[in-house]
Image (cartoon, grey):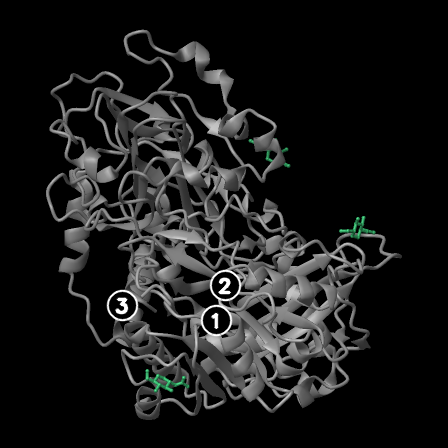
Amino acid sequence: MDMQIFRAYCSIRSFYLFRVLLLSLVALMVFTCFFVYQDKSETPSLGFWDKQMKQTQDQPVWKPEFLGEVNMHVFEDWCGGSVHQLRTNVQYPLYPHIRTTISRLAVSAGWKNYGLRIFGYLHPRYSGEYIFAIASHNNAEFWLSSDDSTKRIKLMAYLGKSGNEWAAPGEYEKFASQISQPVVLSKNTVYFFEVLYKQSEGMDHLEVAWRLNDEKSTFEVITAEYLSRYVDESNILLVENNDIPQTKASQRMSPDPVSKSAKPQADMVKADPRDFMYRIPLLNDLYLENVFPECEYYPLHIFDNETIERYDGINYVHYSSVYPNDHTRLAHEGIDKEICFYQKDETYDKGGGFGQFLKIDNRLEDEETENTNNPKWKQVFGVNASDFHAKQSDFVVNTCNRAGNIVMIKKQVMPVVEAFMSQLNKADTTRDLVLKRVLNVEKKTDDAVGSRYLLELELENTQGDLILLSKYFYALKDKNKKKNLELPTLCSPKGFYWNPDTIVHVILAVKNQGRWVMHFIKEMEKVYKATGDKNFNIILIDYNSTDIDVEKELKNANVPSYQFLRLGGAFGRSPGLQAGIDLVKDDNSILFLCDLHLHFPVTILDSLRKHCVQGKMVFAPVVMRLECGATVQAPTGFWETMGYGLIGIYKSDIVKIRGMNIKEFTDKWGGEDWELLDRILLNKLEVERLNIRNFFHFFHSKHGMWNNE
Ligand SMILES: *[C@@H]1O[C@H](CO)[C@@H](O)[C@H](O)[C@H]1NC(C)=O
Ligand SMILES: *[C@@H]1O[C@H](CO)[C@@H](O)[C@H](O)[C@H]1NC(C)=O
Ligand SMILES: *[C@@H]1O[C@H](CO)[C@@H](O)[C@H](O)[C@H]1NC(C)=O
């Protein structure tokens, strides 16, 4: 049992409401705590209890009439959007402009340039594991104690550091930090909490929600029945501030717990279980034999015309959607450019903006006091958890190049995972596998066919070994389907699979880009070192570079294999790549038509293998284009949704579509990628398109490139 749970459990104390209960339980508690301590071979001293009692006595005496509301302090006329800025206000935290109460953790005063400090107690209805979430415009923090003491609060969730970040009402999953880790709460304990909020301009709102940590619960705003005040401030003079809690959250002095760096943080660069999937051994296909019925392969969104206008192909490409949130959405800069993300929501787009998602509770209007600048401080509202992510269109969205991948919501995904587990468990041989984690799910839907899923699940066998399932399934459209509630039936599409041993040839054509060639080689060494993946080969076509000896550098590189070819004449990307394609003799290997100036995630090779299916599908990964000065640690920029220069395709398929167009694209540069895409579509191959986490294109000018001597 960890310390936090232990404390939560042991800390029912002299709270009015629970005094009677406490007396009857105290003997049992002491015994249990003692027992737990014995387990940890740390004997509790009596001082432990003494100290706890003393701390509680410092806090105002709680009364049952405190239930149903929490305290709120307002700090007005203070610009800036970050909580750090609230903490720097000279009158914070002891001299708020307004001391009032609210009945729900969802407030919107319709005001600007103010800060809020909300505090009180939380009374959970059930004992169990909870997850908290916060959404706001602009920044906010939610702090929770492990019991009723103000001394033991911890930051659970927050939105933003720099002041620019914001979320729409009910949008709890814009930033990873908005959602807390699961925390065990007991219905027999009350918990002190604090919310700090800073609004600058725009539509103000702040809401804190919770849910039980299970697959079925959804986030709901914390309402009156689970709240109580910390102190009665109804008849208080301005200078009476002895009872204002001074805590780790409220402190105005450094170190500021959140704002160590005011730089916007991209969630994408934080580790994700997906990044380490390659370390888990793959489930043997034999294991699944006869478990899932085989079905025909049906192409999704196949291009259905014998002709195509040049460069029209980009309009026929569809994105897949992913789960869980892969944080490819570039929300961290908090700028207006991302509004197009919300415009994919029909309700939003039809007008009304974000305000329509708030249902203002009008009952309070009569109670408003006259002696404040803004009579709406007590205004609370209702809001549902939003699913803007799931509403993104799967068409190419060229205008919204910060939106990242479409993220499915849990409700859409879990029935498919359940269907997989249930079909698996029905088969005798496989009874011993249990689901540990959903690592990654990708979905593509074609209304004419149904949905295809790439299911990537972490499973565990009875020996405790982790096993990775990474396999395509179809959930075919069921014409006879009556109810939506039934689990889908998964089948295994004939010939639609990926193989971790498939060779990947990374093909590049270069001329006098010595520093970037060195960078590319380092990147490939990085991938090899991390994954130990021997099944790849670098093919470098060099237009007689004079700045470095490309061949020598390749020879010295720590990569499993390479091929080198020197060409004369003027640089041409298309003829260069074609020369590389021609070097590959094995029809059953994958070619990655690549470029310089890239930063690769170490998972790139498996990503290519998963999304290239021989005779059926090619992969056009989207790279994030970094702005000038941006780094892979602090990336700013946009997804290169218009670029198709990076293509993964089987050798047999590129032969079938007759390779690069070297007649029209000789030494020209640009356009060759769109033309290739046109022919891929004309040849009835599917195009898989996803934004790839931590796949970056570095900023560079055209100065000194290729033929610019
Ligand atoms: C096929 O493409 C041509 C030329 O782009 C277009 O005129 C025609 O309408 C298309 N046919 C269908 C069935 O979409
Ligand atoms: C939340 O969703 C429910 C069910 O769809 C709906 O009845 C309710 O009005 C919604 N509440 C708000 C505040 O939008
Ligand atoms: C490369 O350049 C050198 C010197 O500039 C020249 O001698 C050689 O023939 C060139 N190689 C090719 C393949 O064109």
> Can residue 277 be spotted in the picture?
no
Asked if one can make out residue 216 in the rendered structure from this viewpoint, the answer is yes
User: Which residue appears farthest toward the right when viewing the image?
Assistant: 480
- Disc on the earlier residue, 1 or 2: 1
Residue 413 percent coordinates (x, y): 62, 59
Q: Quadrant of the C terminus?
A: bottom left
- Residue 442 relative to residue 292: left or right: left
Q: Residue at x 38, y 12 (%)?
A: 368
Q: Residues within 10 Å of mark 2 (few under 14, many from 20)?
A: few
Q: In the rendering, at what x and y percent does residue 118 appear?
A: 30, 33
Q: Which residue is mark 2?
A: 668
The residue labelled by disc 1 is 572
Residue at 73% over, 59% down: 301
Query: Label 3 is placed on what type of residue?
Result: Phe
Element at label 1: loop
User: Alpha carbon of mark 3 to alpha carbon of mark 2: how far?
Assistant: 78 Å
Q: Position of residue 294 (x, y in %)?
A: 80, 78
Mark earlier in primary sequence (3, 2): 3
Per the image, the residue denoted by label 3 is 34
Image position of 166 with respect to 626: above or below = above
Local SS, label 3: helix
Q: Which mark is residue 368?
A: none
Q: Tell me which corner region of the image, top left, top right, bottom left or bottom right, holds residue 272.
A: bottom left
Please name whichever residue, 287 or 450, is drawn nearer the observer in this view of the structure: 450
- Which comes sooner in the sequence, label 3 or label 1? 3
Kindly indicate the quadrant of the structure image that contains residue 432: bottom right
Q: Residue at x 33, y 26 (%)?
A: 201
Give residue 456's quadrant in the image. Answer: bottom right
Compared with 141, 685 (above or below) is below
Left of 684 or right of it: where is 40? Answer: left
Other-residue count near label 3 (Cα within 10 Å), few / some / many at <14 / 14–19 / ≥20: some
